[in-house]
Structures are given as C-alpha cells and as structure tokens.
Image (spheres, rainbow, N blue to C red):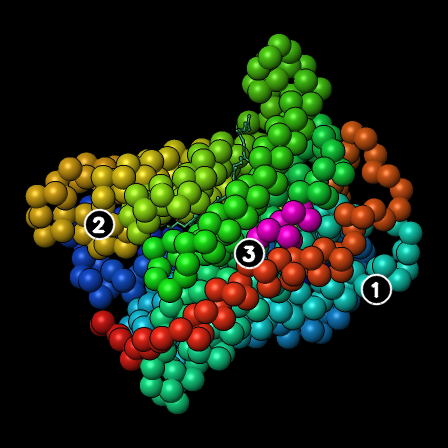
Amino acid sequence: MTPALRLVLSNFWVAVTAFGLGSTMAVMQALARAGIELPFGTASLYYLSVTAHGVLLALVFTTFFIMAIGYLVVDTTLGRIAGQGWAWAGFWLAVVGTVMTTIAILSGTSTVLYTFYPPLLAHPAFYLGATLLVVGSWIWCGVMIASFVAWRRANRSARVPLAFHGMLTTVIIWILATAGLAVEVVILILPWSVGLVERIDPIVARTYFWWFGHPLTYFWLVPAYVLWYTVIPRVAGGKLFSDALTRVVFIQFILFSTPVGLHHQFTDPGISSGWKLVHTFTTYAIMFPSLVTAFTVIASLELAGRARGGTGTFGWIGRLPWRDPFFASVALSMITFALGGFGGAINAAYAMNAMIHNTAWIQGHFHLTVGTAVALSFMGFSYWMLPRVTGRALVWPRVAMVQPYLWFVGMQCFSIPSHIAGLMGMPRRVYTGEFQGVAAAQAWIPLVNLSAVGGVILFISAMCYVGVLLGTMLTMERGPLAEIEYAESIVPPVAGPSIWDRFGLWTAVAVLLIALAYAQPLYHLHTMARFPSRGFSPF
Ligand code: HAS
Ligand code: CU
C-alpha cells in the first residue's frame, strides 16, 4: 500500500470507530426516551450519552472521514500529497484530542452536549481535546493547500480537477468557520474553564459558536456533494451534467456558508431583529446552490438512466443501479435531503422558527441532513472506496446492499415523528418523552415510540455497516487495486483556469461578507450592558 493510501485508511478507521461508538449510544437514548427501562434512564447518564453521541458522530466521525476523502482526492487528482510528515502529525494530534475529549465525557465531568453552550461548564480536558482535534484538522487544511500550490507550480495552465475543487472549497469553509470557534474556545472558554476568569457571557460565546456552527454543516455537506457530482454519475453509468455549474455551486458555498449563523439565534436577546433579517436573507441565498445541486445531479442521473435503456418521463429511474450500495446510499440520501432542505427553509424564516426552535423538530431536521444526506453518503462511499484502496472485495455484498435501505427506513421512522412531535410542542434534548406523566405529553408518546423503533432499525443498519467493513478487512484476501476514476462532464471543461478557479479572490469576498454580517452585531454585543455568568455543571 502506498504511504498516501495508508494516510487515507488511518483517518477512515478512526472515523468508523467513532461511528460505531456513537451509534451504540444513540440506540440507548432512543429506547430510554420511549420509557424502556435501561441503565440510561437516569438524567445524568442520558445526557452523558447524548454528549458522547453528538461529539463522536457530528464532530469526530465527520472530521476524520472528510480528511480521508481529502487525502484520497489529492492523491488521485493532483498525484501527490505534499508534506506527508505534517499530515501524520496532524492525524496524531487529532487522535490525541479525540481521546482526551472522549475520556472527559465518559468520566462524567463534561456533560455539555455537542454545542457546549456556556454557562454549562466542562472539564478543561474536554475543550483542550476539542482544540487539538481542530488544530489537527488545520494541519490537514495546510497539507491540502500545500499540495495544491505544488501542483499549480507544475501545471500553470491546467484547470483545477473538479473533485479537488470541491475539497479545496471544503478546506476554505473550514478555515473561515473555525476562526469563530477559535475565538470562542481559546479566548473565552479555556481561561474560564481553568478558573482564570470567573464569569463568561453566554450570548457572546453562543454568537461565536454559531459563526462556526452553521458553516460546520457545509463542511460536512460539501464533501458529500463532491461524491454526488464527481463519482456517482460514473457509478450510475452516465456523465456529469455540467462541470462549470458545479464549480459555481462550490464557490457559492465559500461565499455564503458563514454569514448566516444568526439563524440559530432568532430567539436570543441582544441581537437586533434587523441583523437577524439580514442573516435570513443570506440563509435563503445559501439554499440556492443546493437547489442547483438537486437539478444538476438529478439531470446527471437521468442521463445515466437513459443510457441504460430507460425511456419515458420516469422510466429512467428504475434503470438506475439501485442494487449498488454506493448508488443506493446517495440516491436515498438525496430523497431524504429534499425533506431536510424543505425543513431548513422553515427553520430559516424568522416567524416559523419560533414554532420549531428548541423542539424535537430540530433533531428531526439534522438527522435528515447530517445524519442521512451526509452520513449515508459517506457509508455508501466506504463500500466503493475500501475495495479500491485495499484490493479486498466486500465480504457480505448482500448485507451492504440492504444496509442503506435499512438506514433510510429507520431514519424516516425516527425523523418524521420527531418533526411532528416538535410541532406539537415536544422540546428537544429531553430524556423522557413522558415528562413524568404530564398530561400534555401524552399526545406525543406514540410518536416518541415510533422514533424509538426507527432508532433500533438505524442501529441494526449501523452495525451492518461496521460489520461489513471489519469483516472485509479481517477475512478477505488482497487482490489487485482497481482504478479510482471520476465522472466526465457532458460538455468537457473549457481549457485553462476560469474565474471559478480563483480561490484567493473568492475567499477575500467571503471574508468581506463575514465582516459585513458580523462586525456590527458583535461590536454591539461586546459594548452593551453585559450579564456574564458563573459556570454550571448540572451533574
Ligand atoms: Fe440546518 C439547524 C436551516 C441545511 C444541520 N441544521 C440545524 C442543526 C443542524 C443542522 C445540526 O435557519 C441543529 C443545530 C443545533 O444543534 O441547534 N439548514 C437550514 C437551511 C439549510 C440547512 C436553510 N442543516 C442543513 C444541512 C445540515 C444541517 C445541510 C447538515 C449537513 N438549520 C437551519 C436553521 C436551523 C438549523 C435555521 C436552526 C433552527 C433552530 O431554531 O434551532 C439549507 O442548506 C437546505 C438546502 C437544501 C435543499 C434541498 C436540496 C435537495 C437536494 C436533493 C434533491 C433530490 C430529490 C430526489 C428531489 C434546498 C439536493 C432525487 C431522486 C432520485 C431518483 C435519486
Ligand atoms: Cu444553520
């Protein structure tokens, strides 16, 4: 195995391990909430588990998986990962950070959920570990950029390969996003958590958190889009509808991912409704590239279905390779994301947000988006990638074939009832659906029970996924490596770099947009009457 592929696989296996642990936590939570007697039925263990679940899945699984995709894409499109020593240093730093944070959570000293809002206070090791994970990912960003610079020097007049274009977009989104996180954690939280400062301002901290927290969701989504655009059309037997349009989509994510964070703070005081409205407009702007994606990727699939002999208005759909686990994962992710994106449009509207904010609707929303559109695409990609980078065929192809469907069914059973319960007023992040028998809660109990059934189906699906990967590594013989190839575009890309390949320019525009969207609200928050708080650890 080449050193580059070893790097890919190391990141990949950390991601899969985090996924296995996080999924196990999840099924316990779903059952506990439905009132089934488990040791997890205490508040302290329940919230410990939710914290571990959120951190391990939303932050650790995604980050390591995305780093793996990034290295694979560099290796297969640019030809060389520059500074592999650095890449390993970043990997180990991120692993050490992850272990620190996980131990801090499991020890019961850091039950602060994945959003770690102050004044909830965790053990300093929780924040330090998270910082090391992020610093490790910054080194990954540095290696990705250095590889690009080296490639550009040798290929002055070439177009940026499309898959790498998307991954460089991911890198830039991540750097812009984590700037806000760095301010929150390094300047505000760390000194407070070690006791150097007694009080912290929750609203200021939350505002920096959501500077980071929204683009975080596109840091997850754009790599999934890279797979949808640059790999899936080929897997389906067709071509990409438009290379140029794909580049425009990626650049729009650089521009609009960050200046939207206040849509998580519509109900927070201290921020004027005018600025909330500005962030509503930019949020609707960031829906646009996803709508273009719906159009472009479906057009690519239609071409594939017709190339496979499909006719009529919908006849092409049945001709698509629904038995291929990677294709099925992405197609089911897309169907799910159509629902999740629709919910997002509701969240983003100031008035409708008041109806669903902090209710079970939100957990429904993000399990459709990050929990399916992203996670299921990554699972499907694993089935495609592992044989190609190890030379081992999948051990139980039928299990791999069924797994995405199980995930899809389980997730609809979990998320749709969560949306409805949220509309009925059920709060998010509660450890029992019954509320100690409060009458109003009776109405949503059947929905909570249905989501528990969804949780069990999801768990079975997750274990099938981990089982197929482990079984493949442990029992299958190595064979020759198959080529990793990307989809071609129907219209070949114009020769030479275009305006959409000018990453420096677009990053500068993005920085300007962030300054416009955040300078005044932050200035106001820092200068108005402040109400800082001591830290609290409920358990
Ligand atoms: Fe969201 C809250 C708004 C997308 C994740 N979001 C969250 C939270 C998470 C999250 C984790 O405005 C909770 C945070 C917390 O813990 O408090 N979200 C949006 C909007 C979009 C959106 C406007 N979210 C995502 C994505 C996520 C994600 C992507 C993760 C990856 N979200 C919000 C808002 C809140 C929020 C508010 C705060 C709520 C509150 O009050 O707390 C948009 O980007 C969505 C655009 C998507 C589309 C869909 C395009 C459809 C496609 C597929 C089409 C395929 C079809 C069928 C039709 C417009 C691309 C295919 C057919 C075949 C044959 C295959
Ligand atoms: Cu958001």
Three-letter amino acid code at disc 2? Arg
Q: Which mark is residue 212?
A: none
**Residue 204: horizontal and vertical position, in percent?**
42, 70
As measured in the structure, the alpha-carbon distance from the residue carrying label 3 to the one carrying label 2 is: 35 Å
Three-letter amino acid code at disc 1? Ala
Residue at position x 81%, y 63% from top? 149
**Residue 419: horizontal and vertical position, in percent?**
32, 39
Residue 482: name its quadrant.
top right
Q: Categorize mark 1 by other alpha carbons within 10 Å: few (<14), some (14-19), many (20+).
A: some
Of callouts 3 and 2, the N-terminal one: 2
Q: Which mark is residue 33?
A: 2
Residue closest to the eye, 119 or 268: 268
Can residue 370 be seen at all in this image of the molecule?
no
As measured in the structure, the alpha-carbon distance from the residue carrying label 2 to the one carrying label 1 is: 53 Å
Residue at position x 72%, y 47% from top? 163
Q: Which residues are magenta?
A: 250-258
Q: Is the CB of mark 1 within 8 Å of ligand 1?
A: no
Say if the magenta span includes residue 256.
Answer: yes
Three-letter amino acid code at disc 3? Pro
Choose mark 3 or mark 1, whichever is in front. Answer: 3
Q: Which mark is residue 259?
A: 3
Of callouts 2 and 1, the N-terminal one: 2
Q: Which mark is residue 150?
A: 1
Residue at position x 65%, y 31% from top? 296
Against 91, is 432 above or below? Answer: above
Q: Categorize mark 3 by other alpha carbons within 10 Å: few (<14), some (14-19), many (20+).
A: many
Q: Is the CB of mark 3 within 8 Å of ligand 2?
A: no
Q: Could you tell me which secondary element the residue under label 3 belongs to?
A: loop
